[in-house]
Image (spheres, rainbow, N blue to C red):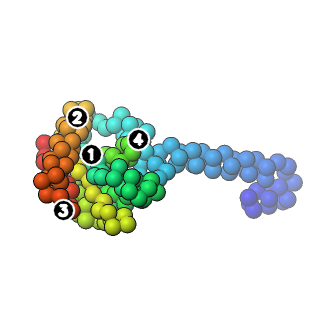
Amino acid sequence: MIGASGIEVILHLRGVLWSTATICLILLFFALTVTKVLYDPLTGTYSRLAYQKRLECIRWKSQITLAMVDMNGLKKINDCLGHGAGDQAICQVAQALSAIRCRRLKVYRYGGDEFVLIGEGLIAGRLERELEGALVRCGTVEGMPVSFVYGVRQGRGAEVEKLLGEVDSQMYVNKAQNLADDVSHPEPSGGYFGGGQA
């Protein structure tokens, strides 16, 4: 803006400042729109739309690792402590997942309390270890534990639809097992089971 003002004064040109201000506002609006569309406003992770775009860009020859994550007990947190506490729990899971350091791994908020992680390469074993560490980082909300279950699969980009089905099924098998264990062992537990590698 200062440079545009200087050009107007020195070269006696009109409209340079106005044009520059207009271009800056358009660029700012574009940046804000892209941020709103590609990032989840609550958690700061990538949005579901960004996830869908990423799936479209996965090359069929590429090697990928997928993980699906589903929180445990969000309804109980919402019912006992309120939706503000539930949002805090979702954010704590998102922060724990975002702290995972694997090769070009991105975290997407898939739905209310579900996340999808997509990484490059066959890194299922490492990602499972990182997810176990993320569980510890989830912490508690007003004394209630925050945890999740997950499933992990790896393979080629050409199999992405099949891998997504497998990882989703594995996650729900693990969730059912976790609920069964909670019934037979009512004391608090870590609340997760790994998905295994494809």
**Residue type (three-letter) at the residue carrying disc 2:** Gly
**Residue 102 visible in image:** no
Query: Mark 2: which secondary structure?
Result: helix
Mark 1 — residue? 68
**Residue type (three-letter) at the residue carrying disc 1:** Met
Image: 134 above or below 62: below
C-alpha span from label 1 to label 4: 13 Å
| Frontmost residue, 98 versus 79 | 79
Across and down, in percent, residue 191 comes to 21, 56
Q: Please indicate whether residue 170 sits to the left or right of residue 1 in the image.
A: left
- Within 10 Å of disc 1 (Cα), the crowding (few <14, some 14-19, many 20+) is many
Mark 3 — residue? 187
Query: Mark 4: which secondary structure?
Result: helix
- Residue at (58, 49) in percent of width and height: 32
Query: Mark 1: which secondary structure?
Result: strand
- Residue at (27, 57) in percent of width and height: 147
Q: Does the residue at mark 1 contact the one at mark 3 (Cβ under 8 Å)?
A: no
**Residue type (three-letter) at the residue carrying disc 3:** Glu
Q: Does the residue at mark 1 contact the one at mark 4 (Cβ under 8 Å)?
A: no
- Badge 4 or badge 3: first in the primary sequence: 4
Q: Does the residue at mark 3 contact the one at mark 2 (Cβ under 8 Å)?
A: no
Quadrant location of residue 26? top right
Mark 4 — residue? 48
Q: Does the residue at mark 2 contact the one at mark 1 (Cβ under 8 Å)?
A: no
Q: Please indicate whether residue 86 sits to the left or right of residue 26 in the image.
A: left
The numbered disc on residue 165 is 2
| Frontmost residue, 132 versus 147 | 147
